[in-house]
Image: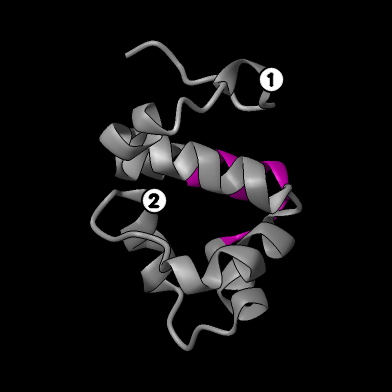
Amino acid sequence: MRGGRYVRELREAAGLSQRQLAALIGLDFYTFISQIETSRGRIPPDSYRIWAEALQVDVKDLVINLMKFYDPVTSSVLDADLTDLNYRPHAL
């Protein structure tokens, strides 16, 4: 659920509704945004750049944070230093 929360926080920080974000990304259905934000789906890797642009964040920061949620094993293998990123996960 934390990955979805991260995406929702980015969307809200960008001042976008789910419908607005869907339009910027080129999605026909805003419900896909809801699926991402409730962790019932993932951002497809081939669209990381367009999501980052729409959310007004650096694509590398977006991918590093998503890797932490989507694939923590790979993230730890890559030894990503998350201390320099703008996003700080909330305590659960």
Q: Is residue 92 visible?
A: yes
Question: Most extreme residue toward the top, as rendered?
Answer: 91
Reading the image, the residue beneath label 2 is: 37
The location of residue 33, given as percent across then percent down, is: 43, 64
The location of residue 87, given as percent across then percent down, is: 61, 27
Please give left or right for residue 60 compared with residue 56 in the image. left
What segment is highlighted magenta in the picture? Answer: 7-17
Q: Looking at numbered disc 2 in the image, what kind of residue is underneath it?
A: Glu
Sequence-first disc among 2 and 1 = 2
Name above or below for residue 45 compared with residue 89: below
Please give left or right for residue 77 compared with residue 9 in the image. left
Label 1 environment density (alpha carbons within 10 Å; few <14, some 14–19, many ≥20) = few
Q: Which residue is depicted at the point 42% across and 62% down? A: 43
Q: Are marks 2 and 1 in contact (CB under 8 Å)?
A: no
- Find out whether residue 14 is within the magenta segment: yes
- Find out whether residue 68 is within the magenta segment: no
Indicate which disc residue 84 carries: 1
Q: Looking at numbered disc 1 in the image, what kind of residue is underneath it?
A: Asp
User: Which quarter of the figure is the N terminus placed in?
Assistant: top left
Please name the predominant secondary structure of the magenta segment in the image.
helix
Q: Which residue is depicted at the point 53% across and 63% down? A: 18
